[in-house]
Amino acid sequence: MGIFAGTTILEMGAGAAGPVATRYFADCGATVIRIESKARPDFLRTLKLTPNTPGGLDAAEHFAVLNVNKLSVALNLSIPEGVAVAKRLALWADAVAENFAPGAMKKWGLDYATLVRERPDLVMISTCLNGQTGPHRFYPGFGGQGSALSGYNHLTGWPDREPLGPYGTITDSLSPRFAALLLASALLRRTRTGEGQHIDLAQVEGGIVCLSEALVTFAANGEALGRVGNRSRHEVPHGVFRCKDAADGRERWIAIAVHDDADWRRFVDALGKPEWATDASLATLAGRLARIGEVECHVDGWTRAHDAGPLAARLQQAGIDAAPVQDLGDVHDDPQLAHRRQFRWVDHPVLGRHPAEMNAIVFPDTPADIRLPAPKLGEHTHQVLRDLLGMSADEYAALESKGVLT
Amino acid sequence: MSGNLDGVRVLDLAGEPGHFAAKLLGDLGADVVKVEHPAGDPVRHRGPFWGHADDAERSLVWLAYNTSKRGITLDVTTPRGRDLFLALAERADVVLETEAPGTMAVRGLGWDALHARHPRLVMCSLTPWGQTGPYAGWRGSDLTAIATSGNLHCTGDPDRAPVRCSLPVAYYHASIEAALAVTFALVARERTGRGQHVDVAMQAAMIMPNMATASMFKMNGSRGSRAGAFFRQPKSEQREIWPCKDGFVSFALRGGPARMPGLVAMVKLMDEHGMASAALKATDWKTYNHNLLTQAEVDALSAEFGAFFLSKTMTELFRAAVERNLMLAPANTAREIDASEQLASREFFVEVDNPGRGRLRYPGSFAKTTSASGGAAVGIRRPAPRLGEHTRDVLAEIGVTEAMVVELRAAGVC
C-alpha cells in the first residue's frame, strides 16, 4: 500500500515544476486531481501541438510522461460557477498545490488567505519562479529563465564558449523535489500538531540554495566561480573522453574520475604503465594539476582505441570510477536502471503503450508504482465531482449544461 | 525557531554526496547530528578555503552544506565506536549514510542490525547506483552518475565532449530526493509503526531532470543531442543563450500563449531603440509558431534580436525584462545573485556567525512558510559544526561521562 494512499491533493497549474512534485505523491498512492481547462490548457499539452496533431491536447508525450497516475477535471475558471467548484475541491482535499503566476489564485479567491478562513488546517504550496512577494514576483519565466537567474547557465560549459545550462532546465527538476519535500513535511506536521500552513517556494531560490558553495565562496573570498568544462580543482584526470564510435557511427564517450593519488596509481596500472604515466611528478595531485592538459591528452589518446562500455567495466574492475556516457536510448538498456525498474510501461488511450520514469527512491515496505496513464483533459470530471466530491446528479447536469465543465 | 520536522532526530553519516540532504532536514527543524571520523570529513581538507587559509574549519564546501547540524567525531569502524553509534541510533528516528553497499553491514551497522534493535528507525542510503543490482558495487560520483543518465549526453556543444555543470548537481538532486524519501518514510511510519530502509540512487535521480525525454525515446526514437547554446526544433535550430554587451542572456524564440506577449513586448522595446525592421514589426505573433519556422526565417529573426542584445548590458536587459514582462534572463554569476533586489526584498540571504572565524553571508531558506503559530520555519538553524564541537553534549545524552569522553578521545574512538 502506497505511503499516501487515502490522501487527496488538488493540483492547479501547468508545466513541470508543479506537476512533477505531485507525481511523487501520486506514485505513492495519493489521489491527485488536476484542474484543467480546454480554453487555457497546460502548455505541456501544446508543446509540439500543430493543427494536424492526431489526438490534439491528449496526445502530448511530455504531458503523458510527467502526469501518470493523476485524474483530470475540466473546469472553466472564467465563469463564477467554475471557480465555485474549484473552491469546493480545494476545501475538501487534504492539500492544494498550485504553480500559477502570483496573483492568479487570489483573483479567483482561491488563495491561501481566503481559503484558510474556511479551512483552518489547510496545507497549500505555491510554486513559481521568483516567489509570491518581491519586486520581480510578476516577472514571467520558465525553467530556461530559472536556470539563468540562479547561476546554472554561467557554471555549465567550457570557459571559452557560451554558458549552456544543464540539459532539461534544471530549476524545473530541482524545484519539484523541494516542493514534494516541503509538502510531505507539512502534512507530517499537521498530523502531529493539527496545524496547516502555506508554503511559498521560489524556484530560483531553491536553485541558489543548491549552489551554496558558489554563493558562500563569493561571500568569503570575493571569487565568482566560473565554468571549467569537466575539470575539477581537486581531481585529475576528471573528464569525458572519446572512445571508438559505435557500429552505427554514433560517437561514444567515457567519463573517468580519478579522485585521489591512490586512484591514480590504480589508473596507471590499468593503463598498462605507459612511460608518460609512470613519471613520478604525476604521482601527486599538485603534479597532475600542473600538467593537466598533457594528462588529458594522453588519456584521450588511450580511450579512443577502446569501446566505452567494456573500457568502463574494465576500469571499474580496477577500482576506478568510470562509466560510459549513455544517451536517452541507452538508458533503456542499462542493466542497473532495469534492475530498479526505473521505466515502467503504461497504456495511454491515445499514445498507446509507453514508459514513464519512476523517481530515484526504493521504498521496500510501501512501494511506489504506476497505475494509471496521464489523464485526457477532463477525463475524470464526472468521477471526481459525482463519486468523490458527492455532487448531486442534478447539480452536475446543470453545470454541464452551462458549459462550466470544459 | 520551530519547523515541520521538529522532534525528528537524524544521525548523518553521509559523505559529500549527502551533506546537503541532512542539511535540508535540519533546515526543516530536525535535530541533525553529523557523525565524522576523528580525522574529519575529507571535504574539510579541500579548498577553496575561507581567506585561502588551509584550515579544516574554513573549507567553504564544508561550511556551505553542513549548516543546521550539530557535529560529533566517532570512529564507527572500531568496536567501541560502533557500540556508541548503536546507542545513539536507538534514540534516533533516521540514519542517513552514503557508504558503498554492504559497508555498513560489515561494520555491524547494516539495516538488519539497526532494524532489529529499533524497529521504528528509518534508514536512508544514498549511493551512486543503488543498494542492489549489477552496478551496486561500482564506484561512482557526480560525473559518472550524470554520464549514465542521458543528461550528460545532451549537455554541451556538438563539436566537443559532453559537459557537466562545474558544481555537482547530481549531489544536489539526489540529496533533495533523499530528504524527501526520509520524510515520506516518516509519514509511512505514522501508519505502519515501522521504519524502512530507503534506497536512493544518484544515477536514477538524474533521469527526471531529462524532463520526460528519456521515456519519450520509446515514443519518438530521439536519443538526444548536444545543441550548445541552441534549442533544436523539428525544422530549425534556435538560439537560446545570447551574448550581450557584458555577458550572456537567456531568451527563446518560442511562441505559444504564455510566451507570445513577451515576444511582442521585446519587438516594441527594440523598435523604441530603432532596432526593429519593418519585417519584424509586421510579424503576426498571434499565428507565429516556432515549430514551423524554417532555418532561414529563424536566422533572420536571430540577426535582429542578436544585434539588439549585443548593444545592451545584462543589467539593462534584465531591468527591461522585469518592467515589461519580457521572458529574458541574465546568465547570472554569484556576483549578480548576491546583488539581486528581488532576493534582498525577500531577505533571502542571511548572516551566519561562525565562532572564531566571523560572519559569513549564506543563501537562506529554500521556502517561506505562513502558519498561525509561525511554527513551520524553514532555514538555517546553526552554523556548520567545528570538528567534534558537540561530541561531549551528544554523548552525554546517552550517558557517556566527561571522563569517558577523554578516555575515548585518547583511544582514537572519538
Image (spheres, grey):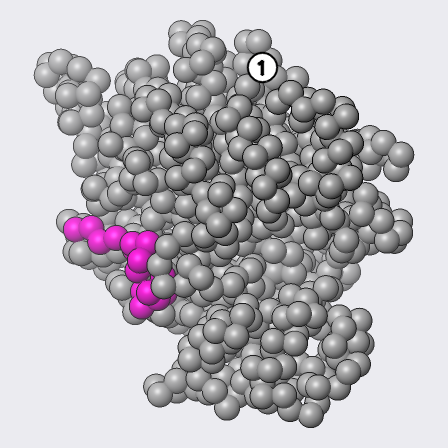
Where residue A321 sits, quadrant-wise, is bottom right
Give the residues in magenta.
A331-347
> Dot 1: within a 10 Å radius of its alpha carbon, few (fewer than 14), some, or many (20 or more) residues?
many
Q: Indicate whether A107 appears above or below A35.
A: above
Give the quarter of the image for residue A297.
bottom right
Q: What's the residue at 57%, 39% (across, down)?
A: B82
As for residue B92 lying within the magenta part, the answer is no
Q: Is residue B129 above or below residue A318?
A: above
The answer to whether any part of residue B246 appears in the image is: yes
Element class at badge 1 = loop
Check disc 1 and report the residue beneath it: B375
Type of residue at label 1?
Gly
Q: Position of residue A362 (x, y in %)?
A: 36, 44
Say whether residue A277 is left or right of residue B259.
right
Which sits in the foreground, A227 or B92?
A: B92
Q: Report the side of A286 relative to B116 (left or right).
A: right
Q: Specify whether residue A338 is painted magenta.
A: yes
Residue A118 x %, y %: 40, 7
In the rendering, at what x and y percent does residue A185 appear? Answer: 48, 26
